[in-house]
Image (cartoon, rainbow, N blue to C red):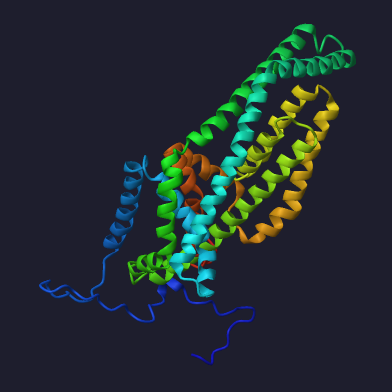
Amino acid sequence: MSGAARPPGTALRPADPARLPDPKPAADPPRPPGWPPSPGARSATRGQRMALVLGTLAALLFALWLFSAILTPFVLAACIAYFLDPPATRLARFGIPRGFGAFLLILGLTAAALLAVLLLYPLLVAQIGVLIQRLPAYVVGIGTLVREALERAQETFGPEVVDAQLRDLVVGQAGQMVTFLATAVGRLIGGGIALFNVFTLLVVTPVVGFYLLRDWPRLIARVESWLPRRSAHVLRQLSRDTDRVLSAWLRGQLLCCLILAVFYAVGLQVVGLELGLTVGLMAGVLSFIPYVGSLTGFVTAVVLAAAQFGTWHGVGLVVAVFVIGQVVEGYVIYPRLLGDRVELHAVWVIFALFAGGVAFGFLGVLLAVPMAAAIGVVARYWLRRYLESPLYLDPPRTGS
């Protein structure tokens, strides 16, 4: 009934990709001599398809659990190859061979990382030395500032609200908090570099990253050739959606972290905070976890400013640096680098990072965002399928 009129306000709904057959069936691969002939095409049962999906997921989880101790450099190399694939593709379009372009990109990234370590690590170690040396003075400074604030509160609200015992208790706890904070920062700087040994950092990750980056298009094509023909179209579309979401979030978030780290480090150094470089870099790097980096850096910087300056004016300057940073991040950096392209909610990212860290340590943190992006894409796909299905579109019951 091609001439039948459609009701007004309705539109033709595109066909479900899952129901579209492949435009061209894949030919059977050549069989080695002596092998039995191919049994020919036949339909798989629903149980076989379910067994394939569950078996693949179980094998991946078992491999992660079994090889989690050695997978970190390989997963890191895969992340580097994924991140550098677009510039390697552009170099190939300019006539540079893929292998040579991959070598140049890996060499440049390794040189930049080594240069950053050689330049920043001595400065960070020197600031840790300053922190250890000035720690007693910091404890006295913050104790004096807190005592003055409590004395003013006692004068304002009366001794019934703020008594001398409460004041001494708060002052003592403030000193212990500064000591704990200093120890935690020292361990963070010292243990961050020890997280990767020199062999892994200088040899395994760059070498594996080079080979993955060089062969990335062929690897992707090989994996696509293994997809079940029945669902290949849908799986390719889901992969493209995952790549779009993941690349937009990952590349935008890394640039955002870099800009914030430079801004906070320079801003805190300008206002005179002795440990401004360390705190600023820490706040920028931890901004990879939404809201956690800025909040952690803000609390640390305010406590250290109170301990160092001993006046509310110095604390106010530090607060102003973070307020300006949040305004720039919220209204300039985030809309330009991320904007509406990112479909990963901040709460979902935070949960994925913490869940991955608890399950597999640093390896889980590396895999958390890709897994969160893939799960989000699949969930939105099934939600669209549900909203187009009779389960959702069934008309409501009428009468009794």
- Say if 304 sits above or below 40 in the image: above
**280 in relation to 172, above or below:** below
Query: Which residue is most to the bottom?
Result: 3
Residue 176 is drawn in which quadrant? top right
Query: Residue 39: horizontal and vertical position, in percent?
Result: 17, 74
Give residue 140's position: percent from left, percent from top.
75, 14
**As rendered, which of 356 and 348 lies closer to the eye?**
356
Image spot of residue 139 (x, y percent): 71, 17
Q: Residue at x 48, y 39 (%)?
A: 357
The structure residue drawn at horizontal position 51% and vertical position 45%, both measured from the top left corner, is 352
202 sits to left or right of 162:
left
| Picture layout, residue 264 above or below residue 331 | above
Q: How many marks?
A: 0
**Residue 286 coordinates in the image, percent (x, y):** 61, 41
Report the residue that reaches farthest toward the right.
Answer: 156
Residue 97 visible in this rendered orientation of the protein: yes
The quadrant holding residue 171 is: top right
- Tell me which residue sits at (45%, 46%) in the image: 202
371, 136: nearer the viewer: 136
**Is residue 184 or residue 120 the one in the foreground?**
120
| Residue 397 visible | no
In the depicted view, which residue is nearer to us: 243 or 8?
243
Instruction: In the displayed orientation, state which residue is furthest to the top.
Output: 165
